[in-house]
């Protein structure tokens, strides 16, 4: 199941386009599932094609759908002046919007080995990692340990603290984006440690998933973000 | 001479008892603690099929629950050392691991009893008095199931959905907890009758992302007999109708 179902994606895209246009008429922007920059099977053997397909087409798509629903309801509640509902919707917006934000970053954080996945960062990010963590291995060890220790669902992040001008490793619960841990934090690499991210392949052995995912981490993207944000 | 001996003996007893008393207060109360152990399943791993696959039951019991037990015992051991050292900073730091792993052990120990093969009563609706209480609080058994499924599906991230008894308010409740928080964290008077694990590991190999499908099917293997027993035990002294 390593082949992306391109035909149905195009049909769905057409339908999405129509509903997007209708909602845009009412002044609300809707969000759409971004395409993966590689085939579902391209990250094997680190992450199976089956996981990638379900993760993208089911989980991320559900966040997008529910995020759009919540935003539409928010728009109605705001127009009606229904503050109680506006507040009540924040949980659904944070969870589904966060899920959309996080996964959009995640797909860019990954790359097939043939396209640089796993290739260590060079340039300013490479130096910064050495300065803050001693070495890339040191960073990987720290992130893997913190990722394994997340209780329940969540993410482990390598981020840039723009204010303190330093790299940080942090974790967030559920679909909380990194920014919920600090307004000046910019995500460079995020690793999904929800069970859906690895269970079909690694079962309960999250540390094994964390050990292998580094082979497909796209340090090129992380470097670009780092250079852009640390001027 | 005899008086002196008696006084010396008395002082010796007094000194010994002081020593013992001091030893008792300084001795960590966990000295004779019982470690947790993985309870056996009351049925075979494949006995809950097709509702829950054998693969899931095996992993869930032998890997997930076992890990909670192992890590809980480890944390308790560390707690004992920290207390013996008077290292209060570590005592506090360990609470997160104790809550998570201890909670995981408590919750899963209940969960295995909440399930039963169909040929052993799994899925068979409850009788009175629990049945009437359910009708009184939720309208019908279907009403309760619908509510639990909706709340279970809506749990953001990992957690549990519970059907519980509030001993203080004398009523039945549906509640959810995050991660491995036991039901009692939502109210100390809450007694769990049924808990359904909605962590992804509880259903993913079989149902993938379709948690709602898992929740729909699990009711065919819910052990209402156990829930009734717990309900009756806790309401014998209360006045619930």
Image (spheres, coloured by chain):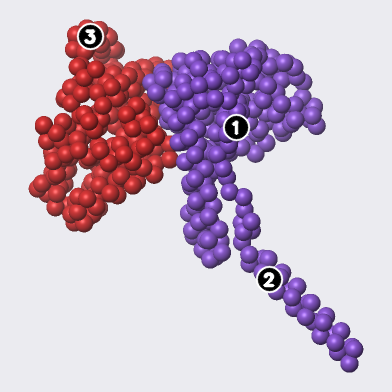
Chain colours: A red, B purple
Quarter of the image for residue A114 reads top left
Q: Nearer the viewer, mark 1 or mark 3?
A: 1
In the foreground, B197 or A69: B197
- Are there few (<14), some (14-19), or many (20+) residues within 10 Å of tag 1? some
Q: Secondary structure at mark 1?
A: helix
Q: Residue at x 61, y 15 (%)?
A: B119
Please tell me if label 3 and label 2 are on a single chain: no
Q: Is residue B199 visible?
A: no
Name the residue beneath numbered marker 2: B22
Q: Position of residue B207 (x, y in %)?
A: 41, 19
Please tell me if label 1 and label 3 are on a single chain: no
Chain for numbered disc 1: B
Name the residue beneath numbered marker 3: A8
Residue B182 as seen in the image, left or right of residue A208 = right
Chain for numbered disc 3: A
Name the residue beneath numbered marker 1: B110
Q: Residue furthest right?
A: B2
Question: Sequence order check: which comes first, mark 1 or mark 2?
Answer: 2
Q: Are marks 1 and 3 in contact (CB under 8 Å)?
A: no
């Amino acid at each position: 199941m390593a082949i992306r179902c391109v035909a149905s994606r195009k049909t769905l895209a057409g339908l999405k386009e129509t509903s997007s246009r209708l909602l845009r008429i009412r002044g609300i922007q809707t969000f759409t599932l971004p395409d993966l920059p590689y085939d579902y099977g391209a990250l094997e053997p680190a992450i199976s094609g089956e996981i990638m397909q379900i993760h993208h087409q089911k989980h991320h798509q559900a966040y997008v759908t529910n995020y759009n629903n919540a935003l539409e309801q928010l728009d109605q509640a705001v127009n009606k002046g229904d503050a109680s509902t506006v507040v009540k919707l924040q949980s659904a917006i944070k969870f589904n919007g966060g899920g959309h934000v996080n996964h959009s970053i995640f797909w860019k954080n990954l790359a097939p080995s043939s396209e640089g996945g796993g290739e260590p960062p060079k340039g300013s990010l490479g130096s910064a990692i050495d300065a803050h963590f001693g070495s890339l291995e040191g960073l990987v060890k720290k992130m893997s340990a913190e990722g394994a220790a997340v209780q329940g669902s969540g993410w482990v992040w390598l981020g840039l603290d723009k204010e303190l001008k330093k790299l940080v490793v942090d974790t967030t619960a559920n679909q909380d984006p990194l920014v919920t841990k600090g307004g000046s934090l910019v995500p460079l690499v995020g690793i999904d440690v929800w069970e859906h991210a690895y269970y079909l392949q690694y079962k309960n052995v999250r540390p094994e998933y964390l050990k292998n995912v580094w082979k497909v981490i796209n340090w090129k993207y992380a470097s670009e973000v780092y250079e852009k944000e640390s001027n | 001479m005899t008086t002196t001996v008696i006084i010396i003996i008395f002082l010796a007893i007094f000194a010994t008892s002081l020593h013992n008393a001091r030893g008792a207060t300084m001795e960590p109360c966990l000295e004779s603690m019982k470690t947790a152990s993985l309870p056996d399943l009351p049925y075979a791993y494949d006995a809950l099929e097709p509702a829950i696959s054998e693969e899931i039951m095996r992993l869930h019991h032998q890997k997930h629950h076992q890990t909670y037990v192992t890590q809980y015992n480890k944390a308790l051991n560390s707690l004992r050392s920290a207390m013996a050292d008077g290292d209060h900073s570590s005592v506090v730091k360990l609470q997160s691991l104790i809550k998570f792993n201890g909670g995981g052990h408590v919750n899963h120990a209940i969960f295995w009893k909440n399930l039963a093969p169909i040929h052993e009563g799994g899925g068979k609706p409850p009788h009175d008095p629990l049945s009437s209480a359910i009708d009184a609080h939720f309208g019908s058994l279907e009403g309760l199931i619908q509510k639990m499924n909706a709340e279970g599906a809506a749990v953001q991230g990992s957690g549990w959905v519970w059907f519980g008894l509030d001993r203080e308010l004398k009523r039945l409740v549906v509640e959810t907890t995050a991660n491995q928080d036991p039901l009692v964290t939502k109210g100390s008077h809450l007694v769990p009758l049924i808990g359904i694990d909605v962590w992804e590991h509880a259903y993913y190999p079989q149902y993938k992302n379709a948690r709602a499908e898992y929740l729909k099917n699990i009711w065919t293997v819910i052990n209402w007999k156990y829930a009734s027993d717990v309900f009756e035990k806790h309401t014998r002294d209360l006045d619930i109708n």
